[in-house]
C-alpha cells in the first residue's frame, strides 16, 4: 500500500487525468487482489484499477478520495515451451511485450502505440496492425485469469467459464480484474513499416487512397494503414499522415501503392520490426497535454470520408483554431470483412459486428491542448462536432452511411458503447455481469469505465 503521490508506474502523457486517490495499492499476486476485494466490499470502499492509464477520460483509471489499485507489479511475461502463446501480466505495456518476443521472431496482437497498457486495450477489443489478418486483439486471447467479486480466482477459456471468456473479449471491466492474459503468438520477424506525410494539396488523392483501402483492404490482409487528418493550429497547418504497415519484407506492395505513390513531404517506410516501429510512435504523443477522444463509424465509402473531412476541418477552423497548443485530427481506421470474420471463426465476441455491411471506417477524433481554461470549450466542441457528423452521415443516402457501432477504446465520455453492440449481446453481457458479480462490486464500488449494467 502506498500513500497517494508515491511512485506508481503509469502514463505521464496526459497528466491532467491524474486524480487524487486516498492511497495506492500495488498488489504482487492475484491473491492479494482477492483479499483486497473482500475488504473493499466489507467497508464499501470505492476503488479504481489502473493498467497502463492511457485512456484520457480522467475517472476511468483513477479516483478521487478512494483506493487506486495499480497493477504495475503484476508484470510477468512468459513464453510457453511450444511458443504457441505468451503469458502477460496486466502491469505491462505493449512495447515491453513486443521487445520480449522480438528475439524469437514472434509477435502478438496488441497496441499500435507502445505506451498503451495491456489490459485496457484487450478488454475493449483492441485494434492491431495484424487485425486485418487475425481480428481483434481480444480474439487472440487463449486464457484470461480473473479475480471475481467473490475473491475466487478462475481461468476463463473457450471451454471453462466460457461465458465469462466471451464477455471479456470486448465487454470492458464489469466482470472482474484480469491478472493474466495468455495471448496467441505469430511469426513475423521482419515487417515493412513507417509513416507517410502528405501536403494539404494532396487532399483529393489522399482521401481516394483511404477510400480504396477501406473498400478493398481484404485483397491483402497483411497490409494495414492508419490514415489521418492532422491540424496544427500554431502553424496554421493541415497535413495528411498515414501509418503504413506490411507484414512482410517489401513495402512496395499493391495494397499500399495508392499511398506510396503520393507526392510525400516524408515517407519513412522501410524494413524494421514491430517492436522498433511502435517505439517510435510514442514520440508523436506530447507529454502533459490534455486530451479528448470521440468516435464515429460509417460504411467504407468515399462520400462519407468527404463529409467527415470537410465538416471537421471547417468546424475546427471556425470554432477552436485559436486554442493554445491545439493539435487535432481524425484517424480513419479501416475495418475489413476478414477482420470481422476472424472474430467469428474464433468463437465470436460481444461486439458482434455485422459482416454483411462491412467494410467500415471507425473514425476517431482526437483533440489535445495545453491550457485547463480551455477544457470546457474543447469538450463541448468535441460532442457537438460528433453530433453534426453523425447527423450528416445518417442522411447521406436513403440507407444511411452511419454505422452505429462505437469502438470502446476510442470512445469519448458519454458515448453509447454497449447499446450499439449486436442485438441481444448487450442483454447477454448484463446477464453475465449479474452471474459473476451479483452485488455489483465492479459497477458501483469501481465506477470508472463503461459499465454494462448502467449503460
Image (cartoon, rainbow, N blue to C red):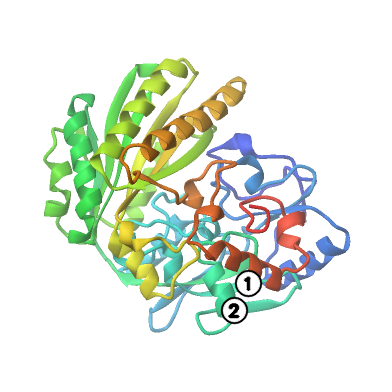
Rendered position, 300 above or below 205: below
Residue 216 in view of the camera: yes
Residue 253 in view of the camera: no
Towards the viewer: 375 or 437: 437
Farthest-out residue, right: 43
Q: Residue at x 41, y 61 (%)?
A: 353
Rendered position, 278 above or below 140: above
Farthest-out residue, front: 398
Q: Position of residue 389 (x, y in %)?
A: 41, 33
Q: Are marks 2 and 1 in contact (CB under 8 Å)?
A: yes
Instruction: Identify the image quadrant of residue 284.
Output: top left
Towards the viewer: 403 or 117: 403
Q: Position of residue 9 (x, y in %)?
A: 60, 50
User: Sequence order check: which comes first, mark 2 or mark 1?
Assistant: 1
Towards the viewer: 83 or 40: 40
Would you call the spot at circle 1 few (<14 residues within 10 Å), some (14-19), or many (20 or more)? many
Q: Which residue is mark 1?
A: 146
Rendered position, 206 above or below 188: above
Real-space Cα separation, disc 2 to disc 1, in angstroms:
6 Å
Q: Which residue is mark 2?
A: 155
Q: Is residue 23 left or right of residue 213?
A: right
Would you call the spot at circle 2 few (<14 residues within 10 Å), some (14-19), or many (20 or more)? some
Q: Is residue 452 left or right of residue 63?
A: left
Q: Residue at x 55, y 79 (%)?
A: 162
Instruction: Identify the image quadrant of residue 240.
Output: top left
Q: Position of residue 175 (x, y in %)?
A: 65, 66
Amino acid at each position: 500500500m502506498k500513500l497517494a503521490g508515491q511512485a506508481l508506474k503509469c502514463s505521464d502523457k496526459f497528466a491532467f487525468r491524474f486524480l487524487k486517490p486516498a492511497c495506492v495499492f500495488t498488489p504482487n499476486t492475484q491473491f492479494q487482489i482477492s483479499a483486497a476485494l473482500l475488504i473493499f466490499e466489507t467497508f464499501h470502499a470505492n476503488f479504481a484499477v489502473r493498467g497502463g492509464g492511457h485512456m484520457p477520460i480522467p475517472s476511468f483509471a483513477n479516483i478521487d478520495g478512494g483506493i487506486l489499485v495499480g497493477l504495475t507489479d503484476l508484470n510477468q511475461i512468459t513464453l510457453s515451451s511450444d511458443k504457441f502463446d505468451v503469458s502477460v501480466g496486466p502491469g505491462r505495456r505493449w512495447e515491453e511485450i513486443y521487445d520480449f518476443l522480438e528475439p524469437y521472431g514472434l509477435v502478438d496482437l496488441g497496441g499500435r502505440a507502445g505506451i498503451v497498457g495491456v489490459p485496457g486495450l484487450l478488454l475493449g477489443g483492441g485494434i492491431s496492425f495484424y487485425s486485418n489478418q487475425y481480428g481483434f486483439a481480444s480474439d487472440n486471447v487463449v486464457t484470461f485469469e480473473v479475480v471475481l467479486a467473490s475473491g475466487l480466482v478462475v481461468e476463463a477459456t473457450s471451454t471453462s467459464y466460457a461465458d465469462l471468456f466471451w464477455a471479456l473479449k470486448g465487454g470492458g471491466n464489469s466482470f472482474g480484474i484480469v491478472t493474466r492474459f495468455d495471448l496467441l503468438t505469430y511469426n513475423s520477424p521482419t515487417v515493412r513499416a513507417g509513416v507517410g506525410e502528405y501536403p494539404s494539396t494532396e487532399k483529393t488523392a489522399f482521401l481516394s487512397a483511404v477510400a480504396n483501402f477501406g473498400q478493398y483492404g481484404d485483397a491483402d490482409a497483411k497490409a494495414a494503414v492508419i490514415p489521418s487528418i492532422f491540424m496544427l493550429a500554431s502553424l496554421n497547418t493541415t497535413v495528411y499522415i498515414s501509418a503504413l504497415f506490411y507484414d512482410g519484407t517489401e513495402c512496395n506492395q499493391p495494397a499500399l501503392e495508392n499511398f506510396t505513390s503520393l507526392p510525400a513531404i516524408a515517407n519513412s517506410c522501410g524494413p524494421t520490426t514491430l517492436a522498433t516501429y511502435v517505439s517510435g510512435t510514442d514520440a508523436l504523443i506530447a507529454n502533459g497535454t490534455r486530451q479528448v477522444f470521440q468516435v464515429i463509424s460509417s460504411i467504407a465509402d468515399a462520400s462519407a470520408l468527404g463529409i467527415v473531412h470537410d465538416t471537421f476541418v471547417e468546424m475546427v477552423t471556425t470554432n477552436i483554431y485559436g486554442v493554445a497548443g491545439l493539435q487535432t485530427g481524425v484517424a480513419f481506421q479501416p475495418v475489413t470483412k476478414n477482420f470481422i470474420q476472424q472474430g467469428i471463426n474464433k468463437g465470436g465476441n460481444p461486439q458482434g459486428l455485422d459482416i454483411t455491411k462491412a467494410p467500415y471506417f471507425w473514425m476517431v477524433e482526437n483533440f489535445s491542448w495545453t491550457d485547463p481554461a480551455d477544457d470546457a470549450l474543447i469538450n463541448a466542441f468535441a460532442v457537438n462536432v460528433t453530433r453534426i457528423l453523425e447527423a450528416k452521415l445518417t442522411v447521406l443516402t436513403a440507407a444511411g452511411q452511419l454505422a452505429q457501432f462505437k469502438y470502446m477504446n476510442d470512445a469519448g465520455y458519454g458515448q453509447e458503447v454497449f447499446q450499439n453492440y449486436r442485438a441481444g449481446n448487450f442483454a447477454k453481457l448484463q446477464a453475465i455481469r449479474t452471474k459473476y458479480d451479483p452485488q455489483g462490486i465492479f459497477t458501483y464500488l469501481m465506477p470508472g469505465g463503461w459499465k454494462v449494467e448502467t449503460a
